[in-house]
Amino acid sequence: MPTLAAGPPVISARQLSKHYGDFKAVDGISFDVPAGESFGLLGPNGAGKSTTMRMIGGVSQRTSGDLTIMGLDPEQHGPEVRAHLGVVPQQDNLDEELRVRDNLLVYGRYFGLPMSYLRPKADELLEFAQLTEKASAKVDALSGGMKRRLTIARSLINEPKILLLDEPTTGLDPQARHILWDRLFRLKESGVTLILTTHYMDEAEQLCDRLVVVDKGRIMAEGSPAQLIREHSTREVLELRFGSERNTTVAAELQGIGDRLEPLPDRVLIYAQDGEAALEQVISRGLRPITSLVRRSSLEDVFLRLTGRSLVD
Amino acid sequence: MTEQAPTTDGAVTAPPYRLHAHKPEVSASRARAFGSWYYAEHVLRSMNSYRWTLLASSVGTPVMYLFAMGIGLATLVDRNSAGAFGEVSYLAFIAPALLASATIMTAATEFTYPVMDGFKWRRVYYGPHASPLNTDQIVQGHIIAVTVRLTVTTIIYFLIVAAFGASPSAAGPVAIPVAVLSGLAFGLPLMAYSARIEEDKGQFALVMRFIVTPLFLFSGTFFPLDTLPVFLRWIGWISPLWHGTELGRALTYGYELPLWLAVVHVLYLVVLAVVGLKLARAVYARRLGR
């Protein structure tokens, strides 16, 4: 999918860097995000995604480079930049001493919003987050997925046009994740620009129009999920397991099948346009894998190709 | 609730843009002007959720201390050393000290564990930090809220002291803001210290045991500071409790205090509070902005 709208970018980063002593958490990354786009930073833990998000969120100072949000430098116009944003941090920081609805009210007060606006708005957001029945519950009593939805509801109290989501579904069960994705998709449809980090390829594929693959503070590749898969992987992947002892030794005998071979400790991946045909070739060479699986290429494969490492270790 | 869409007709709920917030520019300028008060409002609402516990301890503590020390111990002291405390009873002598020490102890509680909670346990500070508020306003908002709490607690304490007849002077109520100032003089440097703690290894328990308790015992609380041997008197001189207590005594029963000394006491308390505030702002900015 090509980049969406024209018009000036709502977020623009040039050679953005953040160092902690000798450690380069973010090492010269550049990107633009146009209004209404859903933009993802995909990478393993420690890649620099959260640090980038914190700089965009106007809460962490950069070491060098340029960064603007709505044309404003967050280091000179912190309150103005943050007033444009909704932020869903990696770790929930709800006030557990307050009730669910009160968490939205006090948060709205930080934006100087009057109670006459906040009361009905809080009810509306609770409905959106499917938490209406929990309005007067203690935050403690909520499940992980509910807390996450409440954090998202809270981030929307000021009607931001840009929403920052740092690993929005990490630690949630599959059902809770799908509910969340659905809510985020609706926000995207309503024109909110979403910036999200994730180390889940399925999340990136579901939500992102465009993404950058980040590793060790640098951008390894950029494009839509489909584009990245097309450019950096084959259509299909054949996964073979020969038992943990044999995977690497067998790899030599598999040479020449498919476009590319990737021996991993627990399995061997064969990248091919036609996975079934590749499997037939394997069998015809007299090799008998314990299990075999043909699947479509995913962002995981892109990441593996670009960095030589798995996304989730 | 079940994790299902709540709409009965199955219709897609409109995304949440029916009511309209003011523009981000308005949010930013309001936050710049009133941010500390907005955060104070939040902290006070949190405190409000356990107001009965706070109220019970605000009433229970003075009643307990005044009965034990002011009535029980005082009977013995007054019988054996009549006139040892000037014209006044032992109860009147210790009442302003108990008042100031209660405020300081409350401040010690409010500026330790809740600070850790803000940075680490429940990360409460990181919510406002992502909003238009800045870190100074988070510090100040927390302080405003605690000051409100200290004032309420101290007023209750003072009313009970007065009910015991232990504040005969008309200037007595002025001891309330003095006690609150003493609380801040002790609490704000402690707040800066608490904000520096990355890992709770029992530091707060040590602060209570080895700083708060000795100050409580050796700040001229139960006996005049000059009855202590000289090598122990310094504890009182550096202690905000002693400075607050001396002022309190002058106010509640007309203890003789030269004006210049009163000024020194007030200045000392103000300087501690201001230095604490500045340190806390620097530590918060560094830690939240990492």
Image: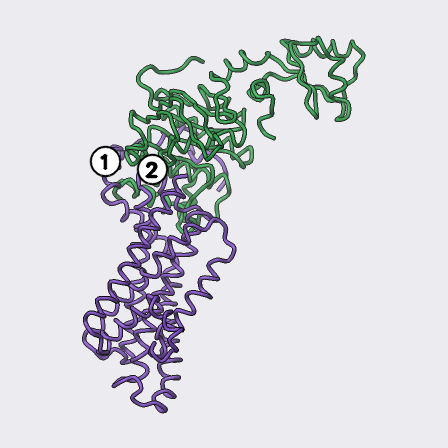
Residue B213 horizontal side relative to residue B95, left or right = right
Q: Nearer the viewer, residue A190 or A193?
A: A193
**Residue, disc 2:** A157
Q: Which residue is mark 1?
A: B26
Q: Which chain is purple?
A: B
**Chain A rendering hue:** green
Q: Tell me what residue is drawn at x 62 percent, y 9 percent.
A: A273
Element type at mark 1: helix
In the image, what residue type sits under mark 1?
A: Val
Give the x, y percent position of residue A299.
Answer: 55, 20
Question: Dot 1 falls on which chain?
Answer: B
Task: Please name the residue shown 33% across and 57% down the image.
Answer: B146
Q: In the rendered structure, which amino acid carries the disc numbered 2?
A: Ile
User: Along the line of sight, which residue is nearer the eye, B37 or A60?
Assistant: A60
Q: Could you tell me which secondary element the residue under label 2 belongs to?
A: loop
Chain letter behind tag 2: A
Please state, as top left, top right, bottom left or bottom right, where the N terminus of chain A lies in the image.
Answer: top left
Residue A300 badge = none
**Up-down: is A313 above or below B133?**
above
